[in-house]
Each structure stands twice: as C-alpha cells, then as structure tokens.
Amino acid sequence: MSKISCDIIQDMLPLYYDEVCSADSRKMIEEHLQECEKCSNIFQKLKTECVVCLLYTSDAADDLIGVD
C-alpha cells in the first residue's frame, strides 16, 4: 500500500475514534499510527479531549437536572 499523508490520516482520526470508518480505513490508520509518532500523538490528544468533553458534558447535564 502506498504511504498515506499525515493530513489524510488526521482528517480520518475522528471517524476512527468514533468507530465509523470502514475496516480498510481502520487498518490503514492503525498501520500509520504505529509508524508515525506525530499522528499517534495527535490521536492521543484527541482521545483525551473527547474524554474531558464527555465528563464536562455529563457534569453540565447533571447540574441542569439537579443531580449531585
């Protein structure tokens, strides 16, 4: 398989994280992440931001409905 640019991989990372890309895309992204430290770091940052966002959203929703 030809080398895929980091720009393309980075565009696909949210789809990969949400598990909505095809099996072929998933395999391509995983292979790229194993070889590319830059994209791997970007993916780790994306995962961290998504978790923080989910926690914040959950806390905000709890505040709206009065859950302690």
Image (cartoon, rainbow, N blue to C red):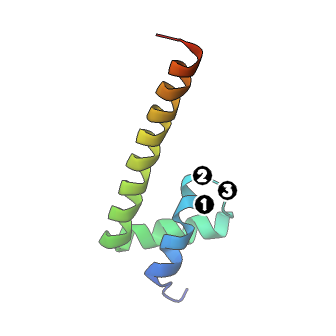
Q: Secondary structure at mark 1?
A: helix
Name the amino acid, label 1.
Leu
- The residue sitting at 51% across, 69% down in the picture is 29
Name the amino acid, label 3.
Val
Report the residue marked by disc 1.
15
Q: Would you identify the image quadrant in which residue 12 lies?
A: bottom right
Q: What is the distance, in whole Å, between disc 1 and disc 2 at their CAs?
A: 5 Å
What x and y, as percent, mark residue 30? 48, 65
**Quarter of the image that includes the N terminus:** bottom right
Nearer-N-terminus badge (3/1) = 1
Q: Could you say which disc has been placed on residue 18 in the image?
A: 2
Report the residue marked by disc 3.
20
Name the amino acid, label 2.
Asp
Please tell me how crowded label 1 is: few (under 14), some (14-19), or many (20+) other residues with Cα within 10 Å.
Answer: some
Please tell me how crowded label 2 is: few (under 14), some (14-19), or many (20+) other residues with Cα within 10 Å.
Answer: few
What x and y, as percent, mark residue 3? 48, 87
19 to 33, vertically: above or below: above
Q: What is the distance, in whole Å, between disc 2 and disc 3 at their CAs?
A: 6 Å
54 to 63, vertically: above or below: below
Looking at the image, residue 66 sits to the left or right of residue 33; the answer is right
Looking at the image, residue 12 sits to the left or right of residue 33; the answer is right
Count up the numbered dots.
3
Q: Secondary structure at mark 2?
A: loop
What x and y, as percent, mark residue 45? 36, 55
- The residue sitting at 50% across, 74% down in the picture is 9
Q: Secondary structure at mark 3?
A: loop
Looking at the image, residue 49 sits to the left or right of residue 54; the answer is left
- The residue sitting at 37% across, 64% down in the picture is 42
Q: Would you identify the image quadrant in which residue 65 lies?
A: top right
Q: Would you identify the image quadrant in which residue 51 lies?
A: top left
Instruction: Check if mark 2's residue and mark 3's residue have beta carbons within 8 Å.
Output: yes
